[in-house]
Image (cartoon, rainbow, N blue to C red):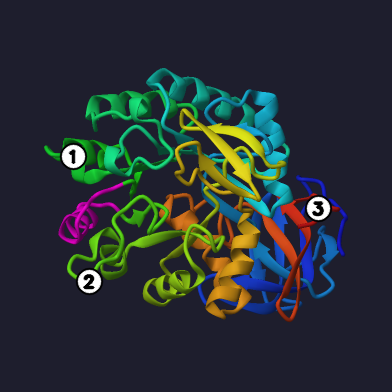
Amino acid sequence: MVTTATKRNSKTLLYHAQLLDTDRAAFFPGEMLYEDGVILGTGAPDTLPREDAVLLDAHGALIAPGLVDIHSHGRAGGDFISADEQTLCRMSRSYLDAGVTTVMPTLASAPYDEYFAAADRIRAAAMHADGARLLGIHLEGRYLNPKKRGAHAPHLLAPLDPSELAALHERMCRPDAPTPIRLSAAWELDGSGEFITTARALGIALSLGHTEASYAQACEIVGRGVSCFTHLFNAMPPLHHRDGGAVAACFDCGAYGEIICDGFHIAPHMVRLAYRLLGREHTILVSDSMQGTGCPDGSYTIAGMDVIVKEGKAYTTDGAIAGSTLGLLDGVRNLMQFCKIPLADALCCATVNPARAANIDTLVGSLKAGLAADFLMLRQDRDQITLTDIYVGGIGKGGIRS
C-alpha cells in the first residue's frame, strides 16, 4: 500500500503501475507524470523523463481515475440544498472515503431563492474543501412532471420558465468563476420550446428525468440536444411493448443512461439488460445518494419531504423511494457482478462517461495530460476489489479504505 503524499508543486513520477486507459477500457503497464496537481503524461514503463521528479512506486497497483458522481444530493448527514460550509467540507471528505474524487452537487426541488443560497455556499466550500472536488451544480428539481415527482414535494415544482433558468444561470455562473451546470427536467412540458433553447444557449448539460414522455416525445427531445436520461427506469413510465416510453428511447437514440446500481432501484437482471443495450460507452453509474448515506438508519429529509432510512433503504412517508444510500464504488462492484464484466469496463461507467455527460471531461474523468491528477489505487483479487489509496490533485490521502 502506498501512503506517501507528495507536495502539490513537486513533479512526481508514478511507476510500476497498471494504468486504466478509459478509451480502450483496459489496464496497461505504465507510468504517469504529474505536477502542480495536473497530469503531464502517461506512457509505457521507463519512457517518461525522471529528471527532478519524485519517484512514487505503485507496487503493481491498478490505477484508475477518481470516481465522478454527477448525481448526488448528499451524504454524511448533509444535503447540498441546506448544508453550511462546515457540513459541505465534511461531506467532501466522506465522498472521498467512498472513492469519489469529484462530485457534482445535486440540488433537489426547493424554493427558488434557496438555489441561490445553496450555490453560493457550495462555491465557497469548494475553495477549501479537502476531500472530493465540489465541481459544478446539477439541478434535479422544480422542472419536473408532477405525475412522476417521486420524492419531490408537489408544492416545490414549477413551470419550465426560460427567464427563471437564465437568472439561475447568471447567479450560479459568475464571470470570475464559471460553473458547469447540469439540468434534469421533464422536457415534454416545454410546450413552446423556449426552455430547451435557452438551456442549450447557456451551455447547460441536459438530461431527461421525472418524465411522462412517450417514446416519440423522448426521441424528439434527444434530437433537440438532451443527451442523458436521469436515473433510468425510475420516475418514468415502465418499458412497455406497445410504447417503450423514455426507457426505450434511451436505448434506441444513443443517449447516456444513469443507473443507480444498488440492486434495489433497478433489479439486477434489468441492470444487465440496460447495460447490454447501452453498452459500456453510454452507461453511467450514479449514486443518487441522500443525506442519510454513511449514517445510521433514521429520519432525514430530501426535496421538502420527510424520509425514513431503514435497513439502508430510503423512503418518503408516503412510500416513494427517496434517493439511495449507495456509495459509487459499491455501484462499480455491483455492475461487475450483475453484468459479469471486467473492472475496467465498470470503472469507465463511473469516471469518463459521467464526466462526458456533464461536460467536465476536460477537467476530470481520465488519466490524460492536462486533466487533474485525481486517481485511485486498487487491488483486485478475483471478484474482490479493494481501494488502497486515493490521490486528489496529486496529493495522497493515505489510510482511506472502502
> Mark 3 near mark 1, Cβ–Cβ under 8 Å?
no
Dot 3, how many residues are within 10 Å of its Cα: few (below 14), some (14-19), or many (20+)? some
Dot 1, how many residues are within 10 Å of its Cα: few (below 14), some (14-19), or many (20+)? some
- What range of the chain is rendered magenta? 211-226
> CA separation, marks 3 and 2?
47 Å
Front in this rendered view, residue 116 or 230: 230
Front in this rendered view, residue 52 or 70: 70
Residue 117 position, x and y percent, is 50, 20
User: Does residue 346 appear left or right of residue 29 in this picture?
Assistant: left
Q: Which residue is mark 2?
A: 241
Question: Disc 1 marks which amino acid?
Answer: Asp
Residue at the far left in the pictured view: 192
213 is within the stretch colored magenta: yes
Q: Secondary structure at mark 3?
A: loop
In the rendered image, which quarter contains the C terminus? bottom right
Callout in the foreground (3, 2): 2
Residue 158 position, x and y percent, is 29, 28
Which label is found at residue 235? none
Question: Disc 3 marks which amino acid?
Answer: Ile
Question: Is residue 36 visible to us here?
Answer: no
Which label is found at residue 400? 3
Dot 2, how many residues are within 10 Å of its Cα: few (below 14), some (14-19), or many (20+)? few
| Lower position in the chain sequence, tag 3 or tag 2 | 2
The image quarter containing residue 383 is: bottom right
Q: Is residue 62 above or below residue 3?
A: below
Q: Which residue is mark 1?
A: 190
Q: Is residue 308 above or below residue 252?
A: above
Q: Residue at x 68, y 28 (%)?
A: 87
> CA separation, marks 3 and 1?
45 Å
Q: Secondary structure at mark 1?
A: loop
The image quarter containing residue 145 is: top left
